[in-house]
Image (cartoon, rainbow, N blue to C red):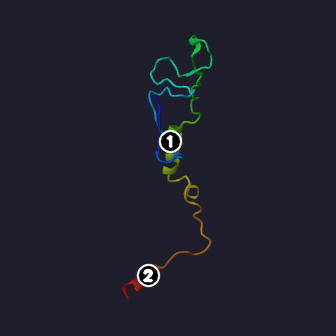
Amino acid sequence: QDVKTKVDEADPESEETTEWGNGLGNHNYCRNPDSSMEAPWCYTMDPNAQHKKELCAVPKCPAHPRDFHSEAHDLRNKVEARDCQCADELYGSTATTADTSVALAGLQEGARR
């Protein structure tokens, strides 16, 4: 049996928390908390006692179309290669349009002062 409790008992408009009981609850969602059937089931509206519960048709998830292990292996090989010219893909363009080098001699002199 599920137990609902107000967050603030003194406030009539207070939100409620629910302490779940045995998993059956007062709902019609598919479940199988006690492994009583071979698959998830739900209650029905059928007045016939023999049809009180019915199995849910829960489809199996399809196999994932991608092979992540193979993709990771291929990417590792591509990044690891030293002659692939892939720096642009990984870090953006490595080409410069002006001399952007910094003379170290000038920096070292300034540090000595």
Q: Which residue is mark 2?
A: 107
Q: Which residue is mark 1?
A: 16
Question: Mark 1: which secondary structure?
Answer: strand
Q: Is residue 5 left or right of 65 when viewed as pictured?
A: left
In this view of the protein, which residue sits in the foreground, 34 or 74? Answer: 34
In this view of the protein, which residue sits in the foreground, 96 or 40? Answer: 40
Residue name at image x 59 percent, y 62 percent: 93
Q: Dot 1: few (<14), some (14–19), or many (≥20) neighbours within 10 Å?
A: few
Rounded to the nearest angstrom, the CA distance separating label 2 from label 1 is: 67 Å
Residue name at image x 57 percent, y 64 percent: 94
| Res. 92 visible in picture | yes
Rendering quarter of residue 108: bottom left
Q: Amino acid at mark 1?
A: Glu
Q: Amino acid at mark 2?
A: Leu
Q: Which mark is residue 99?
A: none
Residue 106 x, y percent position in the rendering: 45, 83
Q: Is residue 28 left or right of 19 when viewed as pictured?
A: right
Residue 36 x, y percent position in the rendering: 47, 17
